[in-house]
Image: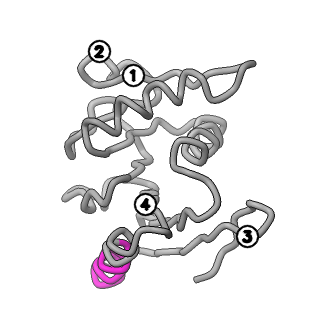
């Protein structure tokens, strides 16, 4: 069964949070797809190359043969690298093939009322489809706490 994880970003922006989550996914041997708006993907591409001085995350944009990489950045529902984990940013909808993923991670900006409402709608949709959904929020010290 697909597990949906909702990450409520409040203390750090997506560009600082996503690399750590991707790093943990790769450590588990998972291939990942990150779906977002095209302009955001370019920013994320840069962030994934530079987020740590001592390492980088192997990834690519689909337009640059990213399908060969363990992480691919896409602006559509496709799964060019055979990902088992899909990250959704910028309020993109659940993919029509959501049940085929081991895990879907939806990240949203808790300081943006529209993003919060969109995440609530995604939560209702996930529950109505029978997916196991959990909600994570950043604590005062920046750690993730399971809230629901």
Label 1 vs 4, first from the N-terminus: 1
Is 102 colored magenta in this rendering? no
- Disc 1 to disc 2, C-alpha distance: 6 Å
Residue under label 4: 106
Rendered location of residue 54, percent (x, y): 75, 18
- The label shown at residue 64 is 2
Q: Residue at horizontal 37%, vertical 18%?
A: 68
Residue found farthest to the top: 64
Front one among 26 and 52: 52
Q: Magenta part of the protein: which range?
A: 119-130
Q: Secondary structure at mark 3?
A: loop
Label 2 vs 3, first from the N-terminus: 2
Label 3 vs 4, first from the N-terminus: 4
Residue under label 1: 60
Q: Residue at horizontal 37%, vertical 80%?
A: 120
Rendered location of residue 48, percent (x, y): 53, 28
- Disc 2 to disc 3, C-alpha distance: 37 Å
Residue under label 3: 139
Q: Assign the magenta stretch its main secondary structure.
A: helix
From what the image shows, is residue 25 above or below residue 102? Answer: above
């Amino acid at each position: 069964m697909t597990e949906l994880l909702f990450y409520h970003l409040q203390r750090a922006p997506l560009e600082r949070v996503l690399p750590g989550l991707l790093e943990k996914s790769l450590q588990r041997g998972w291939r990942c797809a990150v779906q977002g708006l095209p302009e955001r993907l370019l920013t994320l591409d840069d962030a994934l190359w530079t987020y740590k001085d001592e390492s980088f995350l192997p990834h690519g944009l689909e337009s640059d043969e990213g399908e060969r990489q363990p992480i691919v950045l896409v602006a559509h529902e496709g799964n060019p690298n055979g990902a088992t984990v899909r990250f959704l940013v910028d309020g993109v909808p659940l993919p029509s093939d959501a049940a085929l993923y081991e895990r879907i991670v939806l990240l949203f900006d808790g300081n943006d009322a529209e993003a919060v409402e969109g995440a609530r709608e995604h939560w209702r949709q996930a529950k109505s489809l029978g997916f196991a959904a959990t909600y994570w929020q950043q604590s005062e010290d920046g750690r993730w706490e399971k809230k629901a």
